[in-house]
Image: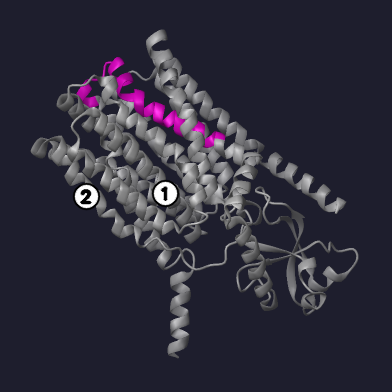
């Protein structure tokens, strides 16, 4: 009786979407809260740096700009490390380095020291910890994955409400050096929550979940002995046509058709593959061991450094990855540009300086709502990710375009709140689709490579802003450009079925040749 209860308890604790999975989601949310606290409070530090070190505004902006570039560029190296080190150790190291970078500012005697501590070290710390959080969550959740990702993103948004006033109080009481020393101690508490980041025990499939909708492992019949396929005639299993995965790992399968199991031995039936779900209630017991052996063999090959580089190169030639990378670049590029110009744009429209700052608060409130509530609805009713991305990016583009005709404080606040809701939803969705289209096993590398692409494209942002504001003299056309870019991304996602069908066609030809 005790043994049965213990097994039942372990199942509940380790099962995805239950038990420890929710503890991991909350821990990731708290880590995100500490992770972006100082980064999102740089507006307060910016003025203090100018006063303390008597620098120009251009010089004082260097630590924040350098930090944003470095933490994106470091992502690709961290993604490769994710195949060789535990995610918990990587996140813990990143959070400890983040606390250290803030504490070292106590010894800063010039702006150069702040560039080193807040720019380089803090950028490396963010780049180490950030890519691993969505990877851990996606390995812990299946049905409520979008809601869990939204919960983690909400932690970063909530930090915008807490850290700026806290930092402002510390600067007033202890000056810049004392305030940063205390902030380092505050951030160090996040290491405690990093200790919880151990995903539930489960068998992971290399299969991208977008085509299967539940995890499956594909076994080539050549790997199994013929007598291992002798199942009872009344036992029904799923047979699907074979398709190679988007990352050239194990095959995936689409076009379900239920057949009698003994039909697999006939000449008319496709003898190429047998597909068994990794869940116990879907997979015959005799296939569990071959499934695990095949997974371990493939996992061993990709864990080597050369295997990781092969995965990296295969992603670069993957059309679905290219689509996701373009989506990430344009989304984060437009949102960061929006943050840079919204306050200045509001002042140009006649909004007082004191009221313009509240636009960011309205955006953050909408961001929190869009990150948690709408993803929960999407998970609950199983709304397609592709459709949700198209709608959210399309509406976000329309809202950006409407800023050019907004002239009152009320309309600006309304548009900012709406953009916050859509941005929070879109950020969650474009994170969730990474494992669903590219596979769980390669998500760490894919996430790091996506951050690298975003970092490279972000170098164009200052040129874009300077051209419209300094040369043309207004932000209106810039908002039109941001809106058009988001609408283009929405239209690009309508090509997703064509990309998948093309992959199917290529693989079927390869199978026919073999």
Check if residue 341 falls in the magenta segment.
yes
Mark 1 to mark 2 CA distance (whole Å): 24 Å
Q: Which residue is mark 1?
A: 150
- Numbered label attached to residue 503: none
Instruction: Indicate yes or no whether the magenta region holds residue 106.
Output: no
Dominant SS in magenta: helix
Up the image or down, 212 lies above or below 368; here it is below
Please tell me which of labels 1 and 2 falls first in the chain: 1
Query: Bounds of the magenta span?
Result: 326-355
Label 2: how many residues lie within 10 Å, few (<14), some (14-19) or many (20+)? Answer: some
Of residues 218 and 442, the one nearer the viewer is 442
Q: Residues within 10 Å of mark 1 (few under 14, many from 20)?
A: many
Q: Which coloring applies here?
A: one colour
Q: Position of residue 443 (x, y in %)?
A: 54, 50
* Res. 186 mark: 2
The residue drawn where x is 40% and y is 62% is 22
Q: Is residue 510 above or below residue 74?
A: below
* Residue appearing at x 45%, y 26% in the figure: 459
Q: Are marks 1 and 2 in contact (CB under 8 Å)?
A: no
Foreground tag (1 vs 2): 2
Q: Quadrant of the N terminus?
A: bottom left
Q: Quadrant of residue 159?
A: top left
Q: Position of residue 506 (x, y in %)?
A: 78, 45
Using residue 508 as the reference point, say whether residue 418 is left or right of it.
Answer: left
Task: Give the residue displayed 30% in from the left and 35% down from the top.
Answer: 116
- Secondary structure beneath dot 2 equals helix
């Amino acid at each position: 009786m005790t043994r049965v209860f213990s097994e039942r308890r372990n199942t509940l604790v380790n099962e995805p979407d239950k038990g420890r999975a929710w503890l991991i989601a909350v821990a990731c949310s708290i880590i995100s809260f500490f992770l972006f606290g100082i980064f999102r409070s740089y507006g307060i530090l910016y003025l203090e740096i100018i006063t303390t070190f008597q620098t120009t505004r251009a010089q004082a902006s260097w630590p924040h700009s350098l930090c944003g570039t470095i933490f994106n560029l470091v992502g690709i190296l961290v993604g490769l490390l994710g195949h060789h080190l535990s995610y918990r150790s990587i996140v813990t190291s990143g959070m400890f380095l983040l606390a250290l970078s803030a504490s070292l500012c106590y010894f800063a005697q010039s702006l150069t020291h702040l560039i080193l501590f807040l720019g380089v070290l803090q950028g490396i710390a963010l780049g180490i910890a950030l890519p691993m959080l969505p990877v851990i969550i996606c390995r812990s959740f299946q049905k409520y994955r979008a809601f869990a990702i939204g919960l983690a993103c909400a932690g970063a948004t909530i930090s915008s409400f807490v850290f700026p006033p806290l930092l402002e109080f510390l600067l007033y009481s202890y000056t810049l050096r004392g305030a940063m020393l205390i902030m380092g101690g505050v951030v160090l508490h996040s290491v405690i929550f990093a200790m919880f980041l151990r995903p539930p025990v489960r068998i992971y499939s290399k299969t991208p979940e977008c085509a299967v909708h539940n995890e499956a492992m594909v076994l080539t019949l050549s790997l199994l002995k013929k007598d291992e396929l002798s199942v009872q005639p009344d036992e029904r299993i799923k047979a699907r046509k074979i398709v190679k995965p988007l990352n050239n790992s194990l095959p995936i399968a689409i076009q379900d058709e239920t057949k009698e199991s003994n039909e697999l031995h006939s000449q008319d039936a496709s003898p190429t593959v047998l597909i068994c779900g990794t869940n116990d209630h879907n997979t015959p017991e005799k296939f569990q061991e071959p499934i695990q052996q095949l997974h371990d063999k493939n996992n061993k090959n990709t864990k080597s450094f050369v295997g990781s580089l092969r995965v990296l190169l295969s992603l670069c030639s993957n059309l679905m990855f290219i689509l996701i990378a373009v989506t990430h670049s344009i989304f984060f590029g437009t949102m960061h540009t929006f943050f840079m110009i919204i306050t200045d744009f509001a002042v140009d429209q006649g909004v007082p300086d004191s009221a313009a700052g509240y636009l960011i608060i309205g955006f953050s409130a909408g961001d929190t709502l869009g990150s948690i509530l709408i993803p929960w609805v999407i998970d609950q009713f199983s709304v397609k990710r592709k459709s949700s991305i198209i709608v959210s990016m399309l509406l976000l583009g329309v809202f950006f375009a409407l800023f050019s005709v907004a002239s009152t404080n009320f309309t600006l606040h309304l548009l900012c709140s709406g953009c916050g809701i859509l941005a929070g939803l879109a950020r969650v969705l474009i994170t969730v689709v990474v494992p669903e289209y590219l596979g769980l096993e390669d998500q760490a590398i894919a996430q790091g490579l996506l951050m690298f692409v975003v970092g490279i494209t972000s170098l164009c942002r200052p040129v874009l802003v300077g051209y419209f504001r300094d040369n043309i003299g207004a932000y209106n056309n810039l908002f039109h450009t941001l809106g058009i870019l988001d609408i283009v991304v929405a239209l690009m996602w309508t090509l997703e079925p064509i990309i998948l069908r093309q992959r199917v066609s290529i693989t079927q030809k390869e199978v026919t040749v073999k």
